[in-house]
Image: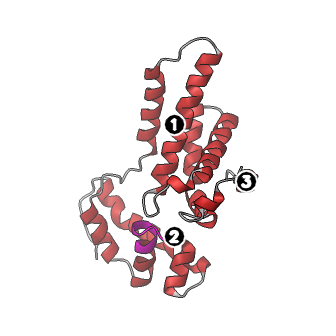
Amino acid sequence: MHRVELASCNLKPLETASDCLGVQEYDTVVRAHVSELHAVALRLCQNPADARDLVQDTLERGLRHLDRYTPGTDARAWLMTIQRRLFIDRCRAKAQHLKRDIPMERVEERLCATGQEALPGWAAISLDELRAALSHLPETFRAIYQLHALEGCSYIEIAQKLGIPKATVGTRLIRARRRLRQLLEPLALGAPETDVWA
């Protein structure tokens, strides 16, 4: 897994940032999305070293601008936006350095292609279908999934709210996701509904 050293970042604006998301929460967000950021960066850069640099720069910029992140919004989308903007900036800088223009169409094509590849097969599942699947999870798994995925709570916050160890939160979240996948996969693949909801 791609390891990111947050400690090496320039942390000047942390006094402001701590009022918003906080470094520990940011670290949790990073751990949740760094693999996907790296996969997208690899498709964009088509070079492992450049992809690692892009991810590192993305996370450093996110850390420097924590005050711009609105808690409760989609952290993954926020990080992906930072990464895409950095990639576009790098393409422009490279074009200037080489004294030639890289057509913007090529950059847009690559960005569009990664967006399509990054979408999971069940991205078209409706909110009603997700709610129906959630209602079939055991309460212990459903509560954790809702707190994490729908309310944006960190593992630590969930552990405190439910009075359980942080490791238990992670384990139950994995099991909840597996069960949801089992329930929703037939719908995503267009298979007729059978006894999936039983």
Magenta-colored segment: predominant secondary structure: helix
Q: Which residue is mark 3?
A: 5
Q: Position of residue 52 (x, y in %)?
A: 67, 41
Q: CA distance from mark 1 to mark 2?
A: 31 Å
Q: Position of residue 20 (x, y in %)?
A: 53, 63
Q: Which residue is mark 1?
A: 85
Q: Which residue is mark 2?
A: 174
Crowding at dot 3, Cα within 10 Å, few <14 / some 14-19 / many 20+, comes out as: few
Q: Which residues are magenta?
A: 146-153
Q: Position of residue 188 (x, y in %)?
A: 32, 55
Closer to the chain start, of discs 1 and 2, is 1
Helix, strand or loop at disc 2?
A: helix
Q: CA distance from mark 3 to mark 1?
A: 21 Å
Q: Is residue 127 visible?
A: yes
Q: Position of residue 156 (x, y in %)?
A: 57, 76
The numbered dot on residue 55 is: none
Q: Please tell me whether mark 1 or mark 2 is closer to you in this view.
A: 1
Q: Please tell me whether mark 3 or mark 2 is closer to you in this view.
A: 3
Q: Is residue 197 left or right of residue 166?
A: left
CB within 8 Å, label 3 to label 2: no
Taking the spot 40% from the left edge, 64% from the top edge, the residue there is 181
The image shows a total of numbered marks equal to: 3
Q: Is residue 146 above or below residue 47?
A: below
Closer to the chain start, of discs 3 and 2, is 3
Q: Amino acid at mark 1?
A: Arg
Quadrant location of the C terminus in the rendered image: bottom left
Q: Nearer the viewer, residue 120 or 83?
A: 83
Taking the spot 59% from the left edge, 57% from the top edge, the residue there is 30
